[in-house]
Image: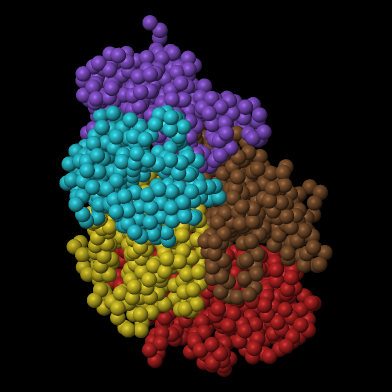
Chain colours: A red, B cyan, C yellow, D purple, E brown
């Protein structure tokens, strides 16, 4: 049966890199499948919630899509997803995964193919237990930032040197770096997405402070690594995937992506690739017009993910393995190397509140 | 030698016409009084000469060169120094800076202007905005002289000036004229204006209505065109 | 909290202030002197950073990149002035807001068109790498000291240009009465193109200098733009001195607020929330300071004599 | 002696080192035109600014209509009945001449906080304003935007606005400036009748007008009143002749 | 009313805004109803700003604050009504639109009073920037205040209710917004033509003159600013109900900028300028977004061409110079 997918993602402005990787990863899977029944319409949300809402309305009302996907940012997702699922449309998230939609407010038609926002931070908390006695943790002062530090603290058992919240969009971190220097911490965990992370890492490298830095995977993902440069070398991060994964699906994905787009994919591309695979898998078994059947097929999640093990939890968020990665330089290119597995079959803390 | 020819110009403010055919000339070294009642187009004529308000038809030739299609600063550089209605000193500059900003090389220098108007020297560091009206008028004249013009145009030369100062200004104008500077002047006080002028041009309703020697400007004509 | 840390933070505040000043300098020049609200100033900052990053990557030299940033931003500024801004001097601020708002959209999207969507790499030149020991024992990045020096130079140069040279006088004269300065034979149009290009070059310079320790990406100019506006308004529009002191005030307030407020909040709220609430207040702090200053001194701290 | 309507005592205003008004004492009595003359920069406009409140005096007092107004705002003084014109015309340029005068008439009536009735349907207000325009001879130009009026016409408009305020006293800063001989003559005649309505403090450099109109003249030099007297007294005063009049007449 | 060219254009605009969703409804294209609703709401917000900016010359770069406050009032009251927890001092939330509107206007007006009281001491560019600063304060407050979603925003699960109307039906909600817009525009017209309006306009043209006829410009402006904030606040509440979502992005300086853009695009100070501007802007955004990924570039280009070559905005272009009586 035909399936119409509406992809709303960020294709212009400062955050466009993430959206473009999302779109490209998604389309790669669609193209590989060669399924004529699947159509995708894509539009740019310019990282503005109001615009995302408008596009969602249009896709639902005019284009009559069955499934929405592609949003990168939590705040845009919160603007679109609850009302979309309330109107009987599926939403399959390729990245944003706010806690609000993972617990009591989970929904039969809402799936998240990426993770739950807290996962990667939890993994770093777990990792920090080995060998770090006093951590300095830092995140921007907004919900995702607070979730991040909460996630970290959920697993980290050591002492906290300080817990600092910075301004959203802050570009200068001298004041925080001075505090790090003075804090006596033996490790630093930062959650600073996008440009904030780039600025922080560059400034940290110049500061002469020599404390190991760690963070969630996307702080050192392929979209930002080239911009940070050598300042990122040695940084530890947690992730569900890295380009050196040694499984067939990952190798194929990597090769296909590089062939198609002539660059290294980031984790956003992988997540979107999997989201597309999930939809394709479900569509081959059930008709999207039968929401219950389609949801059931989606939930079975029979795909070959580059990430390896992948299945859905009761709250329709992933259960997956999470690894420790390290930034290295290989053939002159900065990339992530897998070091060890931190969690096996990790779910999230909110699933127990979900009544699905 | 012919210095300025204004040939049948028509000038508009947007869609409303202010000049309907102004026509006169000036010889080098002449002092011409431009006269007329309120709102007859004196200031507009002056703005047209400086190309601040370019005429829509007709022609203006200064020093043998037509001024149409020239930006105002090019026209000014042909040798026109303007003392505008309302003075328009640069309020945010000091007296000194007002003069220096306008300066172009020539016989008029800061010293000579200061000699002409000692009051300006006293106030050289004061912001022009806080000058009294008379001081501003002196500054506006001094500033125009600093550009070393061939033609000095004064719109309302002595408006708002005390009688003593007015005499100073008129004697300064007379001195400038004696040095050979051409002068086009508008003023309300006929008793002071006419003795300085070589010739008068009278505007009525945006048209040249009369021109001739001051001596020929009879009381009857004065009554008719100027309402004296 | 040690004295050394407090001093280091003070230095950080000053340094942030100087960084803001680099950005604000060009803005206050254009804004104060030409009476033009240029929202696209942040875009010129971005142009500078991208030009520097691209050329530095190509030639391998930050310094050539820095020169390129000046050239590119000045050229962009001159083009913008000739094509757009020139028609706006006689209009009210509103039209300027709209036109330069439109320019932001075009610059951002145009830059992405040229350079792609991912942040660019730009690193500090080897000469200015690393940190030096300060008296008191802490280390401080050399590059940040270099920024302070650059800011001081720019401040001095601009001040001299505007207040002491005939060019400066004519520019200021044109600000109050463009028609009149033209009637005195000064080619104010060309003059303004030059000033705009100069302001743009300053923005480009700031973009390149600051870009080396931040993220060179589309949209990077916007947060700084707002801060730069805050700076020049606090300082008094059109005043170079005001911009410098305003920038230092904003820099120090912001840094100290971020540093001290969370500690202060511990006295009032549970420690778990102190960080977040302190951070929240800190992010509003400079705006609060600005509102207080303008409420007391509506024309900023150092209104230029003419405003 | 009648009680003065405006009484200024010992007014001082400094601009930095410059003392622009230096202990000025002056009054304005009902029915009179009191002319204030003096060289350029003597402090006449500064004095007017202080009386109407756009500048605050450094010391001294201003009593108007039996009340100390030294601490009131410009608008409050205007509502008490201080009407003024400016040395450089000050009008609302986009409004027509009529609407400019209507603004003054509306202010006189009190409330500007009426949000519903359209002013241009307010025939009472329009009639009042037209009457004022007629008195200054601007009837023909009533619907022209003020920006398009010539210099002289704007001066007339300013006077019409002051009239519409039905002020108890007028402060006129060089109303003749920019008027042609004809306009000056007309205005002189007009002010002559106006003094019956309210006394006038007249700053003017047009000596013909001053001598024709003034009941009393005060001469301000360097911020000080150096002489006060009738037209004849002032004309004959040798210091006034040298400081101000020159060889006028 | 005389049928001048401008009045004719206004009439056409008003009818077109009503006709488009009616046709779309008949043609089974409900999305265009949503789009028209968006136009109506943005036009209302801009009409509010137009009172301060177009009539009073108060270029507020912070009206997003009022827009967002209106939005948050709708969101917060609705969420409390849903959860049953009291908002403050035992007052409960509500999902009744008209109560929400009143509260939104009252709160926006109060905040407008506070912001205006301080900002109006300044003028010109300082005013532009201080209003921006206040809006930024509100913005950062909303971003970092956790109770109502912070940066993630706040969803309104079910659109609020209006007695006797099924608000979930797009056409009904459009009609509500359309009527409010017309009332807002009418109010704008009445105020502009009133004595107060005359004083406000005069204060824009010549502040000293207004003071010397005995009117306090500060009070006039403050009143104008508060009225303006209230109208924009009301629009914010409607906007939240349209999207069934509020977030700090309603409070961002981009939003303030967009409101200004709408006004200039349509024609500053013009009665129907905001509507013309909003219609044009939304149409551009929608049409260009469908054509190219680089749509922001072309949107910028079009805006630029409008400022440079269509002085007086769309209405000015079609109707000629404004008359001021
Ligand atoms: N900016 C303007 N816009 C429209 N019309 C104007 C403008 N300035 C002047 N006018 C009109 O042009 C005509 C001529 O005005 P102009 O100022 O040249 O007269 P004038 O002879 O200088 O008068 P005055 O002696 O009062 O200065 C007048 O009718 C006036 O109303
Ligand atoms: N704001 C100010 N700052 C400094 N000096 C000022 C200021 N305002 C006025 N002055 C000075 O005060 C003196 C008096 O000025 P004022 O304008 O009162 O003179 P006036 O008597 O009205 O002269 P005129 O007849 O020329 O208009 C002048 O020397 C002037 O330069
Ligand atoms: Mg004139
Ligand atoms: Mg005076």
Residue C42, above or below D47: below
The percent coordinates of residue E30 (x first, y second) are 76, 65
Q: Horizontal placement of B129 versus A37: left or right? A: left
Which residue is at 32% across, 13% downward? D230
Nearer to me, C170 or A171: C170
Which residue is at 33% across, 24% downward? D207
Nearer to me, B96 or E32: B96
Answer with the quarter of the image where residue C125 lies. bottom left
The percent coordinates of residue D167 (x first, y second) are 49, 21
The percent coordinates of residue A226 (x first, y second) are 42, 81
- Please, which residue is most extreme toward the front here? B216
The percent coordinates of residue B212 (x first, y second) are 37, 40
Residue D218 in sight from this viewpoint: yes
| Quadrant (top left/top right/bottom left/bottom right) for the N terminus of chain A | bottom right
Nearer to me, A270 or C23: C23
How many labels sit on residues?
0
Which residue is at 75% across, 73% downward? A64
| Quadrant (top left/top right/bottom left/bottom right) for the C terminus of chain A | bottom right
Residue A115, above or below B33: below
Which residue is at 74% across, 68% downward? A61
Answer with the quarter of the image where residue A116 lies. bottom right
Q: Horizontal placement of A159 versus B121: left or right? A: right
Residue D202, above or below B5: above
Residue A9 in sight from this viewpoint: no
Nearer to me, D114 or C248: D114
């Amino acid at each position: 049966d035909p399936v119409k997918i509406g992809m709303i993602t960020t294709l212009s402005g400062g955050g466009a890199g993430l959206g473009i990787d999302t779109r490209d990863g998604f389309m790669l899977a669609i193209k590989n499948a060669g399924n004529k029944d699947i159509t995708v319409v894509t539009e740019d949300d310019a990282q503005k919630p109001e615009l995302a809402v408008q596009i969602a309305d249009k896709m639902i009302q005019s284009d009559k899509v069955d499934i929405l996907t592609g949003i990168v940012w939590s705040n845009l997702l919160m603007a679109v997803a609850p009302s979309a699922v309330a109107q009987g449309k599926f939403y399959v998230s390729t990245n944003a995964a706010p806690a609000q939609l993972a617990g009591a407010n989970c929904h039969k038609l809402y799936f998240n193919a990426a993770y739950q926002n807290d996962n990667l931070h939890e993994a770093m908390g777990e990792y920090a237990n080995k060998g770090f006695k006093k951590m300095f943790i830092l995140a921007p002062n907004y919900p995702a930032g607070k979730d991040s530090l909460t996630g970290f603290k959920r697993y980290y058992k050591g002492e906290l040197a300080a817990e600092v919240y910075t301004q959203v969009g802050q570009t200068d971190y001298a004041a925080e770096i001075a505090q790090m220097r003075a804090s006596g911490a033996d490790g630093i965990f930062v959650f600073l997405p996008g440009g904030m992370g780039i600025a922080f890492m560059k400034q940290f490298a110049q500061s002469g402070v020599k404390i190991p830095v760690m963070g969630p995977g996307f702080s050192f993902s392929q979209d930002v690594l080239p911009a940070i440069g050598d300042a990122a070398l040695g940084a530890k991060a947690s992730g569900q995937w890295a380009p050196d994964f040694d499984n067939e699906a990952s190798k194929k994905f990597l090769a296909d992506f590089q062939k198609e787009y002539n660059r290294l994919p980031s984790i956003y591309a992988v997540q979107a690739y999997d989201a597309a695979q999930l939809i394709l898998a479900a569509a081959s078994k059930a008709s999207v017009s039968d929401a219950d059947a389609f949801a059931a097929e989606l939930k079975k999640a029979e795909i070959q993910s580059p990430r390896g093990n992948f299945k859905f939890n009761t709250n329709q968020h992933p259960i997956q393995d999470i690894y420790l990665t390290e930034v290295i330089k290989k053939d002159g290119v900065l990339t992530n190397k897998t070091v060890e597995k931190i969690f096996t079959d990790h779910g999230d803390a909110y699933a127990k509140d979900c009544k699905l | 030698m012919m210095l300025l020819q204004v040939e049948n110009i028509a000038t508009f403010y947007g869609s409303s016409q202010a000049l309907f055919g102004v026509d006169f000339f000036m010889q080098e070294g002449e002092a011409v009084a431009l006269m007329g009642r309120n709102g007859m187009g004196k200031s507009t004529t002056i703005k047209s000469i400086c190309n601040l308000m370019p005429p829509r038809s007709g022609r203006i030739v200064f020093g043998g060169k037509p001024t149409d299609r020239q930006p105002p600063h090019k026209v000014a550089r042909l040798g026109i120094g303007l003392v505008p209605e309302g003075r328009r000193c640069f309020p945010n500059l000091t007296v000194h800076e007002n003069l220096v900003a306008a300066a172009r090389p020539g016989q008029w220098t800061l010293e000579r202007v200061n000699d002409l108007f000692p009051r300006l020297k006293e106030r050289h560091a004061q912001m022009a905005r806080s000058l009294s009206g008379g001081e501003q008028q002196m500054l506006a004249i001094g500033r125009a002289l600093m550009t070393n013009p061939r033609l000095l145009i004064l719109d309302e030369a002595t408006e708002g000036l005390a009688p003593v100062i007015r005499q100073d200004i008129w004697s300064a104008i007379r001195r400038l004229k004696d040095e050979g500077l051409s002068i086009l002047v508008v003023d309300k006080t006929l008793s002071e204006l006419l003795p300085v002028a070589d010739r008068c041009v009278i505007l009525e309703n945006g048209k040249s209505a009369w021109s001739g020697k001051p001596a020929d400007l009879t009381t009857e004509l004065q009554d008719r065109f100027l309402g004296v | 909290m040690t004295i050394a840390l407090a001093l280091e933070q003070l230095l950080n505040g000053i340094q942030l202030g100087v960084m803001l000043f680099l950005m604000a300098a060009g803005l206050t020049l254009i804004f104060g002197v030409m009476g033009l609200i240029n929202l696209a100033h942040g875009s010129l900052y971005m142009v500078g950073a991208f030009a520097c990053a691209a050329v530095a990557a190509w030639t391998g030299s930050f310094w050539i990149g820095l020169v390129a940033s000046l050239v590119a931003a000045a050229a962009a500024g001159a083009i913008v002035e000739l094509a757009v801004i020139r028609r706006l001097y006689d209009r009210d601020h509103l039209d300027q807001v709209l036109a330069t708002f439109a320019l932001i959209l075009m610059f951002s999207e145009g830059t992405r068109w040229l350079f792609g969507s991912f942040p660019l790499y730009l690193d500090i030149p080897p000469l200015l790498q690393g940190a030096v020991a300060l008296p008191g024992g802490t280390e401080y990045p050399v590059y940040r000291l270099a920024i302070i020096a650059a800011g001081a130079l720019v401040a001095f140069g601009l001040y001299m240009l505007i207040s002491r040279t005939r060019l400066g006088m004519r520019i200021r004269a044109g600000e109050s009465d463009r028609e009149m300065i033209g009637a005195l034979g000064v080619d104010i149009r060309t003059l303004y193109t030059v000033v705009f290009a100069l302001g743009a070059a300053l923005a480009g310079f700031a973009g390149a200098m600051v870009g080396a320790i931040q993220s060179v990406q589309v949209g990077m100019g916007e947060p700084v733009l707002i801060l730069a506006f805050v700076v020049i308004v606090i300082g008094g529009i059109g005043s170079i001195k005001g911009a410098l002191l305003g920038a230092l005030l904003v820099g120090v307030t912001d840094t100290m607020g971020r540093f001290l407020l969370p500690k202060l909040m511990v006295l009032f709220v549970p420690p778990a929330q102190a960080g977040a609430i302190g951070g929240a207040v800190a992010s509003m702090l400079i705006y609060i300071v600005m509102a207080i200053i303008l409420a007391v001194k509506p024309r900023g701290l150092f209104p230029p004599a003419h405003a | 002696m009648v009680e003065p309507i405006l009484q200024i005592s010992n007014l001082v205003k400094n601009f930095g080192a410059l003392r622009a008004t230096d202990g000025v004492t002056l009054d304005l009595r009902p029915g009179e035109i009191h002319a204030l003359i003096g060289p350029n920069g003597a402090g006449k406009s500064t004095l007017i600014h202080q009386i109407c409140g756009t500048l605050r005096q450094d010391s001294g007092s201003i009593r108007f209509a039996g009340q100390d107004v030294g601490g009131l705002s410009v608008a409050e003084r205007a509502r008490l009945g201080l009407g003024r014109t400016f040395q450089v015309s000050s009008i609302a340029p986009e409004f027509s001449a009529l609407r400019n005068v209507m603004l003054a008439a509306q202010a006189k009536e009190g409330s500007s906080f009426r949000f519903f009735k359209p002013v241009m349907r307010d025939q009472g207000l329009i009639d009042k304003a037209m009457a004022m325009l007629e008195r200054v001879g601007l009837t023909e130009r009533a619907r022209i935007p003020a920006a398009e009026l010539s210099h002289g016409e704007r001066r007339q408009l300013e006077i019409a606005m002051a009239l519409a305020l039905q002020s108890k006293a007028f402060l006129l800063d060089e109303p003749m400036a920019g008027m042609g001989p004809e306009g000056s003559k007309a205005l002189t005649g007009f002010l002559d009748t106006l003094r019956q309505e309210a006394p006038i403090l007249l700053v003017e450099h047009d000596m013909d007008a001053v001598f024709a109109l003034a009941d009393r003249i005060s001469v301000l030099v360097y911020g000080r009143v150096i002489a006060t007297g009738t037209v004849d007294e002032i004309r004959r005063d040798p210091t006034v002749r040298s400081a101000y009049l020159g060889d006028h007449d | 009313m005389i049928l001048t060219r401008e009045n004719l254009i206004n009439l056409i605009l008003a009818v077109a805004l009503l006709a488009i969703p009616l046709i779309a409804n008949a043609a089974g294209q409900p999305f265009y109803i949503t789009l028209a609703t968006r136009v109506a709401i943005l036009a209302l917000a801009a009409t509010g700003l137009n009172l301060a900016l177009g009539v009073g010359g108060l270029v507020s770069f912070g009206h997003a604050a009022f827009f967002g406050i209106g939005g948050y009032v709708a969101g917060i009251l609705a969420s409390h009504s849903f959860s049953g927890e009291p908002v403050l001092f035992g007052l409960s939330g509500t999902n009744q639109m008209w109560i929400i509107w009143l509260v939104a206007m009252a709160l926006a007006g109060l905040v407008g009073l506070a912001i205006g009281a301080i900002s109006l001491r300044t003028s010109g560019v300082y005013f532009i920037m201080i209003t921006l600063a206040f809006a930024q304060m509100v913005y950062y407050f909303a971003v970092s205040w956790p109770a109502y979603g912070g940066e993630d925003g706040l969803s309104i699960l079910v659109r609020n209710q209006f007695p006797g109307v099924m608000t979930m039906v797009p056409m009904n909600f459009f009609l509500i917004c359309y009527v409010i817009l017309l009332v807002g525009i009418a109010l704008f017209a009445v105020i502009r033509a009133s004595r107060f309006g005359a004083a406000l306009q005069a204060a824009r043209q010549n502040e000293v003159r207004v003071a010397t006829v005995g009117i306090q410009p500060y009070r006039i402006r403050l009143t104008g600013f508060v009225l303006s904030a209230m109208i924009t606040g009301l629009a914010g509440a409607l906007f939240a109900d349209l999207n069934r979502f509020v977030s700090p992005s309603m409070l961002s300086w981009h939003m303030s900028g967009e409101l200004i853009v709408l006004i200039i695009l349509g024609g500053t100070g013009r009665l129907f300028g905001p509507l013309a501007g909003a219609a044009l802007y939304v149409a551009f955004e929608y049409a260009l977004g469908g054509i190219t990924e680089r749509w922001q570039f072309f949107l910028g280009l079009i805006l630029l061409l409008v400022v440079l070559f269509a002085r007086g905005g769309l209405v000015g272009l079609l109707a000629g110079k404004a008359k001021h009586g």
